[in-house]
Image: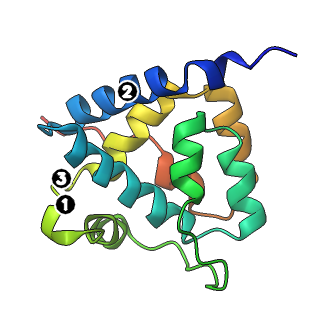
């Protein structure tokens, strides 16, 4: 069997995702963007059981899947979903002296993630996860003009 295309092009796809997330968030560098993405993924993962998290990870591109499960302490019980401000603060807390994630970081990563995944597969898996999961990755609210 040939190597799946998603694996063959994992690095290129990840670089495109990082560029998209960087531009969406208005960040300057890949390193800033990586920390933001990792913080958002860890914040979400902390609210899932291992079985739910693995189901979610299956719809992620390979490099994001690896980031999502890396350095995971499986002994910690899932946290409840909280309000957006609390979740944002948690995502911004990863490596706080090197974290430039904006207040919009969850919505910014969510927008880039929706563009990098199969939208039907993402929606289908979110429908199986605990309440709050779909809202976490939902479309950011429109800015009133």
Q: Can you identify the residue that label 2 sits on?
A: 15
Q: Residue at x 47, y 35 (%)?
A: 113
Q: Percent x, y for residue 100?
A: 15, 55
Q: Can you identify the residue that label 3 sits on?
A: 102
Q: Nearer the viewer, residue 142 or 48?
A: 48
Q: Residue at x 19, y 70 (%)?
A: 96
Mark sitting earlier along the chain (2/3): 2
Q: Label 3: state its secondary structure.
A: loop
Q: Which mark is residue 99?
A: 1
Q: Label 2: state its secondary structure.
A: helix
* Foreground disc of the pair 1, 2: 2
Q: Label 1: state its secondary structure.
A: loop
Mark sitting earlier along the chain (1/2): 2
Q: Nearer the viewer, residue 13 or 133?
A: 13
Image position of 131 (left or right of 52)? left
**Dot 3 and dot 1 residues touching (CB under 8 Å):** no
Q: Percent x, y for residue 1?
A: 88, 16
Q: Residue furthest front?
A: 2
- Few, some or many residues within 10 Å of mark 2 (<14, 14–19, 20+): few
Can the viewer see residue 14? yes
């Amino acid at each position: 069997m040939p190597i799946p295309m998603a694996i063959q092009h994992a690095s290129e796809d990840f670089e495109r995702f990082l560029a998209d997330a960087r531009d969406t968030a208005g960040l300057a560098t890949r390193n800033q963007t990586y920390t933001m993405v990792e913080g958002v993924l860890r914040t979400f993962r902390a609210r899932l059981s291992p079985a739910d998290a693995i189901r979610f990870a299956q719809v992620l591109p390979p490099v994001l899947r690896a980031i999502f499960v890396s350095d995971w302490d499986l002994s910690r019980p899932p946290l409840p979903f909280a309000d957006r401000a609390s979740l944002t603060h948690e995502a911004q807390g990863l490596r706080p002296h090197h974290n430039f994630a904006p207040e919009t970081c969850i919505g910014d990563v969510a927008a880039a993630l929706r563009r990098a995944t199969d939208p039907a597969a993402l929606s289908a898996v979110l429908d199986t996860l605990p309440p709050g999961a779909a809202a976490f990755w939902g479309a950011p609210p429109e800015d009133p003009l």
